[in-house]
C-alpha cells in the first residue's frame, strides 16, 4: 500500500520551457519491497484554500466572476497530468516530478497564476497507476487506488522564478495571425523599435 506526500518544489532550470519540479515522497507502509511503479499524477489547483487581496480579486474576475458568485464558481483548475516511474525501494523513496507550465492567459491555470501577487498556490495531487511489488509467491501486480492524494502549498515566488527562467519580467498573449500581421505592419511603418512600445503607442491612441 502506497502513501504519497509532496515535500518541496523549485523551478526546473534545464527544461525546454517553463517547468516546476516537485519532490514526491512515496512510502510503502506494509514493508514489502517495491520493484517499480508506473504512476499517473493529476495536479489540480484548489482556489478555495487561500485568501485573496483586492487586487488579486479584481484580476480573477474574468476567471471566477464577481465575488458574490465565488461560492459556486471557485472550482478546482486542472494544472497538468504527468507520469513518473518509481525506482525499486523498500520503505520510502523521493522522486522528482516535472510539471510543465504555461503563460498563456487563455488557459485558466495561467490566468490564475498571473493574478497572484504573493502567498501560496494550493495544489492537490491525485494518483493512479500500476504497482509491481514483492509478494509471497514472487512478483505481484497491483493498482494504485484512485483515492490516494497529496497536498502542496506552492509558493507564488517559485512559480514566478520558473517563468522568469524563460520570460524574465514578461508575460505572453496569444493572438490571431491576422492580428500579428497587422501589428507587424504598424510597427514597421512607424519604425517602432520594440513590441512594448508598439502596444503602448496603440493604447495611448485608444485612450484619447
Image (cartoon, rainbow, N blue to C red):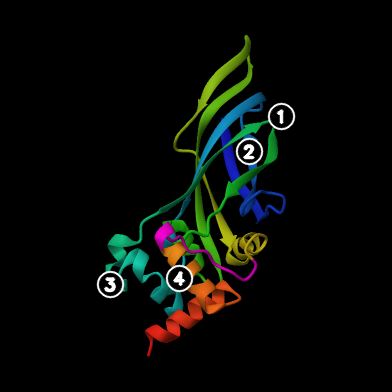
Nearest to the eye among marks 1 and 3: give it.
3
Q: Which residue is mark 2?
A: 26
Quadrant of the image occupied by residue 154:
bottom right
Is 145 left, or right, of 87 in this rendering? left
Nearest to the eye among marks 2 and 3: give it.
3
Q: Earlier in the sequence, mark 4 or mark 2?
A: 2
Tell me residue 109's x, y (percent). Answer: 46, 57
Q: Which residue is mark 3?
A: 68
Q: Earlier in the sequence, mark 2 or mark 1?
A: 2
How many numbered discs sit on the rendered protein?
Answer: 4
Do the residues bearing badges 2 and 1 touch, measured as CB atoms within 8 Å?
A: yes
Q: Which residue is mark 1?
A: 89
Q: CA distance from mark 3 to mark 4?
A: 15 Å
Identify the element where label 3 is drawn. helix
**60, above or below 139, in the image:** below
Q: CA distance from mark 1 to mark 3?
A: 49 Å
Tell me residue 23's x, y (percent). Answer: 66, 47
Q: Check disc 1: other Cα within 10 Å, few if <14, some if 14-19, many if 20+.
A: some
Task: Give the residue at the far front of this rendering.
Answer: 189
Asked whether 187 or 16 is in front, the reply is 187
Asked whether 35 or 82 is in front, the reply is 82
Q: Check disc 2: other Cα within 10 Å, few if <14, some if 14-19, many if 20+.
A: some
What mark, if any, has residue 51 been given in the picture?
Answer: 4
Tell me residue 129's x, y (percent). Answer: 52, 29
Identify the element where label 4 is drawn. loop
Amino acid at each position: 500500500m502506497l502513501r504519497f506526500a509532496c515535500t518541496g518544489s523549485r523551478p526546473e532550470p534545464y527544461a525546454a520551457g517553463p517547468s516546476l519540479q516537485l519532490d514526491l515522497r512515496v512510502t510503502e507502509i506494509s514493508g514489502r519491497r517495491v520493484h517499480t511503479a508506473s504512476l499517473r499524477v493529476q495536479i489540480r489547483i484548489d482556489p478555495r484554500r487561500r485568501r485573496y487581496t483586492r487586487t488579486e480579486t479584481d484580476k480573477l474576475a474574468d476567471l471566477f466572476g464577481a465575488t458574490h458568485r465565488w461560492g459556486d464558481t471557485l472550482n478546482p483548475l486542472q494544472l497538468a497530468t504527468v507520469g513518473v516511474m518509481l525506482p525499486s525501494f523498500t520503505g520510502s523513496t523521493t522522486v522528482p516530478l516535472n510539471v510543465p507550465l504555461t503563460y498563456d492567459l487563455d488557459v485558466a491555470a495561467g490566468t490564475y497564476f498571473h493574478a497572484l501577487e504573493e502567498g501560496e498556490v494550493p495544489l492537490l495531487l491525485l494518483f493512479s497507476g500500476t504497482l509491481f511489488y514483492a509478494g509471497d509467491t514472487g512478483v505481484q501486480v497491483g493498482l494504485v487506488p484512485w483515492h490516494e492524494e497529496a497536498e502542496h502549498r506552492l509558493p507564488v515566488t517559485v512559480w514566478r522564478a520558473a517563468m522568469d527562467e524563460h520570460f524574465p519580467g514578461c508575460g505572453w498573449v496569444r493572438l490571431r495571425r491576422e492580428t500579428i500581421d497587422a501589428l507587424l505592419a504598424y510597427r514597421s511603418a512607424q519604425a517602432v523599435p520594440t513590441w512594448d512600445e508598439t502596444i503602448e503607442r496603440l493604447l495611448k491612441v485608444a485612450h484619447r
